[in-house]
Amino acid sequence: MLSGLLDGIFSGISLGSVLLLAALGLAIVFGLMGVINMAHGELMMLGAYTTYMVQNALKGTPLFGIYIFIALIAAFIVTAIFGLVLERGVIRYLYGRPLETLLATWGVSLILQQLVRSVSWQLVTIVALFCLLFFGAMWIVARRTDFERARGWFLAIMIPLSAAAAIATGNVLGTLYKPAFTKLWFDARNVDVTAPKWLRGGFPIAGTQFSYARIFIIVLTIACVVGVYWFLNNTPWGLRIRAVTQNRTMSACLGIPTKKVDALTFALGSGLAGLAGCAVSLLGSVGPNTGQNYIVDTFMVVVVGGVGKLAGSIIAALAIGTANYLIGSNTLVDLTAPIKPLSDTFAFFSTISMAKVLVFALIIAFLQFRPGGLFPQKGRTVDA
Amino acid sequence: MSEKILQIENLTVDFDGFRALNNLNFSLDTGELRVIIGPNGAGKTTFLDVITGKTKPTTGQVTFKGKSTKGNVEYQIARLGVGRKFQTPRIYLNLTPRENLELSCNRYKNVWNALFGKPSSAERRTVAGLIETIGLDAKADLKAALLSHGEKQRLEIGMLVAQSPDLLLVDEPVAGLTDEETENVGNLLLALAESHSIIVIEHDMEFVRQIARKVTVLHQGTVLCEGSMDEVQNDPRVIEVYLGKQEDDRAAA
Amino acid sequence: MDALIQSKSKARQRLLIEAGIVAAIALLLLFVIPPILVGSGQGFRVNLLGRYLALAIAALGIDLIWGFTGILSLGQGVFFALGGYSLAMFLLLQLPDGQLPDFFSPYGVTELPWLWQPFYSLPFTLFAIVFIPTIVAATLGYLVFRNRIRGVYFSILTQAALIVFFNFFNGQQKLINGTNGLKTDTATIFGQTVSSPPVQAFLYTLTILLLVGGYALSRWLTSGRSGRLLVAVRDDEARMRFSGYDPTMFKVLVFAISAGLAGIAGALYTVQSGIITPQAMNIAFSIEMVIWVAVGGRATIVGAILGTLIVNFAKSILSERFPQFWYFFQGGLFLIVVTVLPGGILGWLREDGVRLVRSQINKRRPLQTYPSLEEDPGVQYERKNLANRESDG
């Protein structure tokens, strides 16, 4: 009985900490820019694949024992750069149109999923060559003064031209160096990350096995939360981020470079997604759809947590994680066994997928009392 | 008692520990035009928010036409006969001024009527008349997004009139208007005051002097003093908190 | 008053012309296109066209709620599936007395679950196709809108609802066959199998008729006072509230109607494709529906239909030829439509297309002012005044 409860709480917290890690970046970005990033799950997936690649690269070297730390750094950097590109390339054109941003980032997430499935040296070459030709030509032509007028023609000519050149080169190289060049890096199957030896297994307390990997994730989450908290509260850029979150126009008037703040925040949020992906890879195999499994739950964390305070996200993530686990496992069924109708109800919901049904109902019920989440913004600044 | 259209007793509003309104008492006679002034952060806008039901009072109550508005939300209070104009003009940008006015003018605001109702010819005449009154007949069928700021202000006041409320709440109606436009709006408000009760919130002292008969000064969430413009201007407390310890003329300018 | 009567008769005339065009297109779809496709050996495309026209009905619903009212629902798949499952359950029950649908036997179910009982009746089924989605949407919408939860919050809540329904349908093997879904193609109705040509031809016709009906409903809702109120919800809810309208009820109404349309679409799609599975409720499908509308042009009802047909035929052609590039293409479509073409195809035609064609013919671009000076009533008014004054003096 006790061990069941202990196990339930531990698993719930570990589930919650994964959620929190995934939702942290999302919540920061949403709080700052009002943007829901549908590609957040795919950034996690990229982080997980980065972990996989780091693991493969270090296999057999003495560094393999600590590869997970190198992977964490690599995942952070890769996804942060990707987030930066995403912000500069797409999202900055869509500020103030949150619903459109949502659709655009969904498009990005589709592209990323397929990218992982079909990435090969050939594809990389084609994309790189296209970017080189197209943006190179743009860079040259853009210096002419009458560029704005000729823009339409330029795009109409250069896009097909660069694309054709890039694809032709890619195909020629593909036929020349057949197997190596066109071989898919990952293909559509899931890949497995093997945890280092010291993360396997666990230690038993009161008949429950506390897995090291899960403890590692909990510690990682705590470290990230503390780090983000420290960054936001004790650094000049953190101060700027908080200022822009509260009043964008006023901050801009006071000379805060809001564009840089946006880009930085987005990169930070994406980097955190990468860390989350790294953590997720320790829990099971990783596939192109990995991100999809997490996004809806992390969105719910943001909705329940409310905007503006990190504490909201923390409590919401832990609550949703624990509720999901307690309902989904048989813990509650056992606990309420003496009361027959109650335990029957819980038994009906005691699968992972049915637990989500009940948790969603609870969230809707919660929102009837606290529509703004746990920590809503108050005062007359809130729009009617 | 029946001639009091609005009565507010012991009203307090807290936001997360910040007290926006503090034990405020206020009453307005039917047909009165009242101007409320007060320094920034005195709680003027919150005051309007409470009357219109946007903000719930922490304690105290609002009585409109002899009935407590407690438990009513914005649209119910609006249907009771309270109209509100916002600080920045809020109109439906993707509709034409004529359509904007028609929506406000409509008497039956339930879903059923929206689906099956048609504007009556009396409503159409009212709208046509109003468009002329606010001087938008040339642009009556353009999207409201294309109107200038002053035109938007006038349109919103027109929408307020179309709603034919018993009590009008007007928040800074002349912000960002030229002198001539300001005078027009002032005359419009004075004309409206013949048949409506009006509360105006304003910073522009010239304008206040033009329209005010009785002025209420808010300070730190409570009523500091009430009276005619001259009385208020000579009240030492007002001079201290609001006009500063300066000459009246300079402060008014 | 004269002007009023004149404008009224003009409006009626325009309405008649529009009705004529719609009828002509419907007749074209009914009697001309199928023989052409069959004649050219592309008979299967008729079935595809029928399915896509069914999807267009769902797109109409999205245009109402997103295009006009500005509420982005990412959960239309729920209503689509509810409609589809309702009809599928009815069809699977078209069996001799006492027999159970085949799929029950592996699970050892020997008695028909109570949920299935009402679906013996055709009237109830027809009612359920429209009103079960409507009621679900109205309930969810009321609970959410009542608390002024809007914008992206609403979108992600509908998406969560979608996942919840997906999980529920996926997990209920003994009730509705779980992941495998319900197959309708071998069921019989009126003594014919559903997949036989006469039944399919009937369904094709029915789809077109219902699409025309949906078009008329959407036009009716978006014209006149209700249409203006929908735009008002999009523009400024607070203003509405302070003018005495309750936006919640309007939002619930339009959400419920869009759900009803999605339910009809789901039912028609199911019987033409032969199967309904919980996959109808995966996240991607529901967002895809939004992009159909965006491609055609939001807040233009024709655009919703046009966009659905274009995107879906592009999908069927592209994914036949280059299966892996469809996702790249689709992702790119999301990005391009949102950033470069926010008005969709119809919006672009209205704004730029006409001007572009004209400038190509004239070789000279007309000067654009904003709003164009020639069309500005203000300027015309002043001119008239000037003229009057001159004539007076």
Image (cartoon, coloured by chain):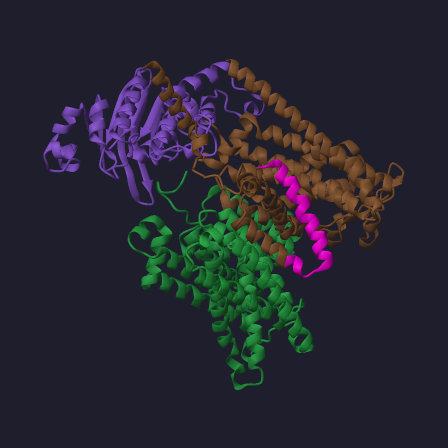
Task: Please say whether residue C312 is one of the residues in the magenta stretch.
Answer: yes
Q: Residue B5: x, y in percent?
A: 33, 20
Horizontal relation, residue A25 to residue C310: left or right: left
Name the residue rendered at 13%, 36% in the picture.
B240
Chain colored green: A
Where, by quadrant of the figure, is residue B187 drawn?
A: top left
Q: Residue C79: x, y in percent?
A: 66, 42
**The C terminus of chain C lies in quadrant:** top left
Chain colored brown: C
Horizontal relation, residue A367 to residue C297: left or right: left
User: For chain B, what colour was chosen?
Assistant: purple
Q: Residue A244: x, y in percent?
A: 36, 53
Look at the image and give the residue range highlighted in magenta.
C300-327
Q: Is residue A10 above or below residue C46?
A: below
Task: Please say whether residue A130 is one of the residues in the magenta stretch.
Answer: no
Q: What is the residue that sits farthest to the front in this orientation?
A: C363
Horizontal relation, residue A67 to residue B144: left or right: right
> In the depicted view, which residue is nearer to us: A241 or A318?
A241
